[in-house]
Image: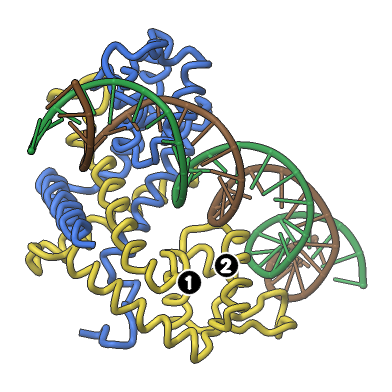
Chain colours: A blue, B yellow, C green, D brown
Amino acid sequence: MGQEADGIDLETSLGYLLKEASSALRAAMDDVLRPLGMTVTHYSCLELLAQRPGLSNSELARGAFVTRQSMNVLLHALEREGHVTRPAEAPVGKVLPTRLTPRGRRILEKATVAVRSVEERMLAGLSETERSEAFRVLQSMTRSLRAGGDQG
Amino acid sequence: MGQEADGIDLETSLGYLLKEASSALRAAMDDVLRPLGMTVTHYSCLELLAQRPGLSNSELARGAFVTRQSMNVLLHALEREGHVTRPAEAPVGKVLPTRLTPRGRRILEKATVAVRSVEERMLAGLSETERSEAFRVLQSMTRSLRAGGDQG
DNA sequence: TGACCCATGTCAGGATTCTGACATACATTC
DNA sequence: GAATGTATGTCAGAATCCTGACATGGGTCA
């Protein structure tokens, strides 16, 4: 009610609110990551590698929500800075498994502290049940959106 | 438990989930908007103008989560296509109030139908109480994130 | 009235990302 | 063993967006 055929009320739209929250999160993360010379994609890539060493370029791209090409240039930069290593030749197939260097692991630790503070600030004021509820709802939304994308 | 000082478990991170959901939503909206030759920012701008006619460039930028500069080039494009109109001179100050043309209103109606279908798909499987719960939680997150950003 | 501060619209430059395309490697099928 | 389909890494070009900067208009305060 209140939003007939004349438009979608942005004030009450969950889609708009989702974008708003995501935008605020990105901005907050960028703020705390900037002193470390890192960006959100930077951090995402490193964090993914810490949890699942040996990930390929394509897998990292999917995990960080960017294209293979973007992740490729990022990996080259990280390699140049000595934060990750990739074998010159693929052990099997074309996949070049990427791994963190000690230096990469070190800067990731700093970034993790910063990011965790942001996440805690975001969750401030929410009870434990509200957090798990939000978790389930967000998962449901993502699943439903992905399910429909295959029809085209 | 399970996510001590060695990192943030992306599988259980609400921040990561938020980004994932937002990314899926954007992809789904782009899919249904592409046949109309529109992008998400396009649509956001038109929808904002429909609800609050006379919005300025800067206000539209904030509402669509882009910079003034990006919104400026978008408005020029929309003006060239005859979807919006802006006075040649500012009635007061430097602000140029923007308004939808009948043609802009027409294409917005089509876009609204498409976007509404995406939003309904996203909300499928969620009860009414879950939706309002998600609404409150997302609002709380955004507010908390914004509150801390002013300290720098 | 004048100084100061903030917000706006706009221009130029650079950085980032994406779209499109290609060759290669593995798995599956016949 | 050959053909096909899928997935990967990479290159080139274009589109997009942002950072930095400038001049202008309005409000506040002395």
Q: Residue at x 44, y 24 (%)?
A: A75
Q: Which x, y percent locates residue B11?
A: 18, 34
The residue that label 2 is drawn on is B74
Pointer 2 with pointer 1, Cβ within 8 A: yes
Q: Quadrant of the N terminus of chain B?
A: top left
Q: Name the one closer to the observer, A148 or A45.
A: A148
The residue that label 1 is drawn on is B45
- Amino acid at circle 2: Leu
B20 relative to A60, above or below: below
Mark 2 or 1, which is nearer the eye?
2
Q: Which x, y percent locates residue D10?
A: 47, 26
Q: Residue at x 32, y 30 (%)?
A: A60
Kindly state the secondary structure of the residue where label 1 is placed: helix
Q: How many marks?
A: 2
Q: Name the one closer to the observer, A67 or A45.
A: A67
- Residue density around tag 1, few if under 14, some if 14–19, many if 20 or more, within 10 Å: many
